[in-house]
Amino acid sequence: MALIDILHLFHSFYRYDESGSVSGTKAALKDVTLSIEAGSFVAVLGHNGSGKSTLAKHINALFLPSKGDVKVNGRNTRDAGEVLLIRRDAGMVFQNPDNQMIANVVEEEIAFGPENIGVPTEEIWERVGDALERVGMTAYRMHSPDRLSGGQKQRVAIAGVVAMKPQCIILDEPTAMLDPMGRREVLRTLHELNEKEKITILLITHHMDETIDADRVIVMDDGEVVLDDVPSVVFSHVEELRSRGLDVPVATQLAYELRQKGLELPDGILSEEEFVEAYLKLCK
Amino acid sequence: MFKDITLGQYYPGESVIHKLDPRTKLSGTMLFLISLFINDKFIGLGLAFLFLMTMIKISGVPLRFITRGLKGIFLIVLITVLFSVFYVDSGTLLVEFWVFKIYSGGLANAAFIALRIMLLVIGSSLMTLTTTPTRLTDGLEKGLRFLNVIHFPVHALAMIMSIALRFIPILTQEMNKIMKAQMARGADFEKRGFLRRIRGYVPLLVPLIISAFRRAADLSQAMDARCYHGGKGRTKMKPLRYARRDFIGYLVLFSFLAATIAIRIMPCGC
Ligand SMILES: Nc1ncnc2c1ncn2[C@@H]1O[C@H](COP(=O)(O)OP(=O)(O)O)[C@@H](O)[C@H]1O
Ligand SMILES: [Mg+2]
């Protein structure tokens, strides 16, 4: 059994007219089947409106399937009695850091989740201290979240989830509102959590370069999963990605264009280093 | 104008006032406000002023930081003062023009009311400046717990309040941003005339309200995602427990109240 099992998931949004009857539907997810293994780092790519956020909210039981099933740790999100356990095991971080903070002090913000699930007071203190350390924000413990940089705010939000001891963290475009430095901070934190704590990471993004270190990249388009493989294989589909409104990492792009011009560069180049290495080999 | 509102902001610190139990501060603020209305003499307000200044001094919050918040209510004070000048016709007649007459008693009355409003605002902002919204919520929730008996949603109300307080600075920042964006496109917020000025704010309020709703939707989802499900079964990182300083606090408060009442009863003309 995988950590997260999604089986033939459909989700439709309905528009209602004044009399309350359905006047329009929008199929946001169409027959998505996925399973996410415990301990993996999975990136989800897709342009705006491809259904990424909708998918994320299903894993957290914020949405319920129109058809199909979502299971976290074997617990079905349709099972109302299990919802709190599902949310504890699969925590979620959202795009806008300001809109997910409840408290005015960093440590109280992090305590919010553990308080909700009834963790005893002494243990909350331990968890908060621990979570702060995990994301490298111990020095800001007593600060107000409003005074932090975007990257720091997101790290606090991540700590808030870490303090609930989740098995999986789902992040819905956590870097979309951050500057390059903030993005790097958040990415580093996520990889550390994945490697040291074995927390499964599901990172939704539309920055290609954030996905090259993932174990697996899932590409979504119009509510469907269209590619699902390791990054080097996914990014070798340059034409397909372009037709779906996505870019590829710069190094991949360059290698692709040079290959079109007849240079014999290999497939699956993702980073600058790999490109330089392959190019030097070619020159010899 | 909006950036000057310090009401509802938190000023981090380590003072005794910061550490007091929020219930003590809530009752303290209530008692202080009551004392302002018990007072009918300048000497009483003087005592309240002294009391408040001492508290501010102990809290370590810079006075300038607090008085900045007064600018926002300056207009209200001014209007009140103008009305109250003409309201009283005791004492000696000082100025007379057309139907207006200003007596010395009127001036004294106006000064009295202005002072009272200032103390009222500063007094209540001291509480929010030294208490995090979370603590304030906790204080309200625990202090008013007895209302649960009549099924009054104490927890929900306290949560709503703390979130409102948390979002005041964020929405204020946003307001300034929208204002600047509109000004960059030629909007004029300094228009002459009350009505035209009010109308000038409409294009500001619409985006602000829409954005507030969007934030509210986001926040409620984020709270759901973090297992929030009301007050049931919820534990606290910082449970409220009265300490020795709280008893001293209550002692000081009641002495202050007793002194205020004594001054009120005191038969003297000052
Ligand atoms: N609350 C909603 N009501 C109606 N339609 C929605 C709602 N949320 C999303 N959608 C639609 O569902 C589709 C998928 O949206 P979303 O999951 O937010 O995509 P993404 O996160 O990839 O940008 C989009 O076409 C969007 O317009
Ligand atoms: Mg989205």
Image (cartoon, coloured by chain):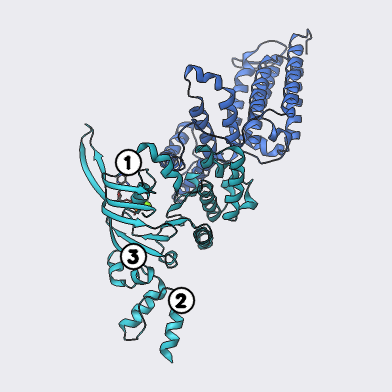
Work out how far the residue at label 1 is from the one at label 2, CA to CA, in angstroms: 45 Å
Under 8 Å from ligand 1: the CB of mark 3? no
Kind of residue at badge 1: Arg
Identify the residue under disc 3: A246
| Front of the two marks 3 and 2 | 2
Kind of residue at badge 2: Glu
The circle drawn on residue A125 is none
Drawing shade for chain B:
blue
Q: Position of residue B118 (x, y in %)?
A: 66, 27
Verify CB contact (< 8 Å) between mark 1 and mark 3.
Answer: no
Up-down relation of residue B94 to residue A26 (above or below):
above
Few, some or many C-alpha atoms within 10 Å of disc 1 (few <14, some 14-19, many ≥20)? Answer: some
Up-down relation of residue B197 to residue A224 (above or below):
above
Few, some or many C-alpha atoms within 10 Å of disc 2 (few <14, some 14-19, many ≥20)? Answer: some
Res B260 quadrant in image: top right
Q: Position of residue A33 (x, y in %)?
A: 28, 55
Can residue B7 be seen here? The reply is no
Closer to the chain start, of discs 1 and 3, is 1
The circle drawn on residue A272 is 2
Identify the residue under disc 1: A78
Q: Name the residue located 74 percent from the left edge and 28 percent from the top edge.
A: B244
Kind of residue at badge 3: Leu
Chain letter, disc 1 residue: A
